[in-house]
Image: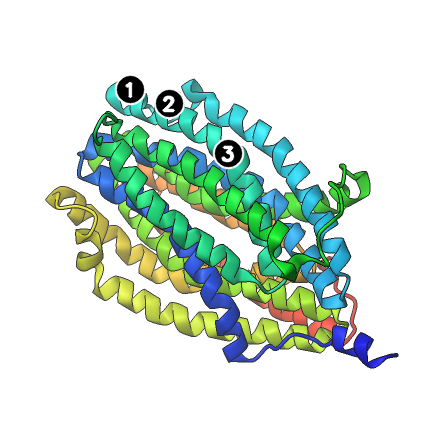
Amino acid sequence: MSTRILSRLQPPDTSYWAIIKLSLPVWISNVAIVGGATLDTLMTGHLGSTDLAAVAIGLAVSVSVFVALVGVMQGLSPIAGHHYGAGHHERIGFELHQTIWLAILLAIIGMGLMCYTPMWMTLTNSTGRVAEIATNFLLINAIGLPAAMAGRAYMAMNAAVSRPKVAMWIALSMLAVKAVTNYIFIFGWAFIPSFGGAGCAISSTINAFLSLFLYWVIWHYDSFYAKMRQKRISMPNRKALTNLLKLGIPIGLSAFFEVTSFTFMTIFISRLGADVVSAHQIVANLTSLFYMAPLAIGVTSSVLVSQSLGANSPETARMATYKCLKFCICLAVFVSALLYFCKYFFVGLYTSDLDVIKVSTYLIGFASIYHVFDAVNCVGSFSMRGYRITFLPMIIYGVFLWGLGLGLGSILTFTDYLSPAPMGAAGYWTAITIGLTLSGIIVGLCAVYVARAFAHGHKVWLR
């Protein structure tokens, strides 16, 4: 074998410094993306609880649809990472084209779901001004869904080939644009009228198309991607799409179970009143921001594992899994302490309403407990994606986050079957804390087992 071939099969660096260098841009990208929703919450919070509640409902529905569909496309990351590790650069552009075709199809489905607003308003028991704002929010957001999903295909590809800084700079640029356009469309400026909470959706739609354009320009003109680009657009390929779906559907369902365990909480808690749902939305947004760190480490673990396996080095993949899990646990413990002891400061950034602050600071106690296990959940499941094991995490998420989190949560929140009186919003947060703790332990142990089995050449019964 020539020296050139050997160098192409060189496994990736899995040192802690390498993990940080790869995770940091991913973390910044994700924080910037979630920062858009944070801006929505911060800005509409100053309009009053009506607009904030409407935006909370609109975001809950939009995020549920978006994350589930984008998750189906995430089969691209381990596939492209494996090709990159093996030196098959020419296959990456082909897989990217197939993922974009898939994004178009899924976006059509997603737009239909988001535009069916009467169902969502009935489900959330929303009426009057809240329903009007939430409906407009969803209809406008649906317009930007195809661009947002296609952009995520480019984002996944860049992470897989160890170029997360591209997504980072685009996300930061879009956050700056979001801040300006949010202000313009929420509060009005010059000849542009105030759209209130619905203005957030206008801003997000503009961002989606602008970021997709930037991704396209970089892909076509950056010399780094020269070996990956196809000379012409690849038409849909049944085999390639089937492989994407085999990995992507379980990933999409896992993401759906995880995210909707919170967004559906928002939808159901909205029946308890504007103050309660506002408090829940603040804490949910805070925890999603802090979740970006383990998510970045999780993406890194998937990339390093898939690249290591592509380079035919399962031992390197095992080390990547172990180190990413250790790193995320240490970081999550620190973040949990920070969240709990600084809770009044964080909540004060969102609102000055004393009733909302009281409920929010109480709910943060639950978040500070489950964050460590949620972090293990994330990194463990992403690591298994690198090994192309996606079905098991889906089952675990469904049982513990939906079955236990939402099922038990509904009983505790609205009935007195298991408690002296209905617990209100705390019922859902109690149940989701139990669900995330149990799923985190199981997923973490499974990830360690898979990494060890691959390294020793043993058959993995979880596949």
Q: Which residue is mark 2?
A: 121
Label 1 – label 2 distance at C-alpha: 7 Å
The location of residue 347, given as percent across then percent down, is 21, 52
Q: Residue 281: x, y in percent?
A: 30, 43
Placement of the C terminus among the 4 image quadrants: bottom right
State the image coordinates of residue 386 (x, y, percent, origin top left).
66, 61
Q: Residue furthest right?
A: 1
- Badge 3 element: helix
| Spatial separation of the CA atoms under disc 3 and disc 2 | 20 Å
Sequence-wise, the earlier of marks 1 and 2 is: 2
Look at the numbered disc 1 and give the secondary structure of its residue: loop
**Which residue shows up at 81% across the image and 43% down it?**
239
Instruction: Tell me the residue at 54%/34% (across/down).
Output: 146
Callout 2 secondary element: helix
The answer to whether the residues at label 1 and label 2 have Cβ atoms under 8 Å apart is yes
Of 394 and 8, the residue lying toward us: 8
Q: How many marks?
A: 3
Camera-near label (3 vs 2) is 3
Q: Which numbered dot is residue 47?
A: none
Find residue 127 and name its label: 1
Q: Is residue 268 visible in this depiction of the protein?
A: no
- Which of label 1 and label 3 is nearer to you? 3
Give the label on residue 145, or none: 3
Tell me which residue sits at (49%, 47%) in the image.
258
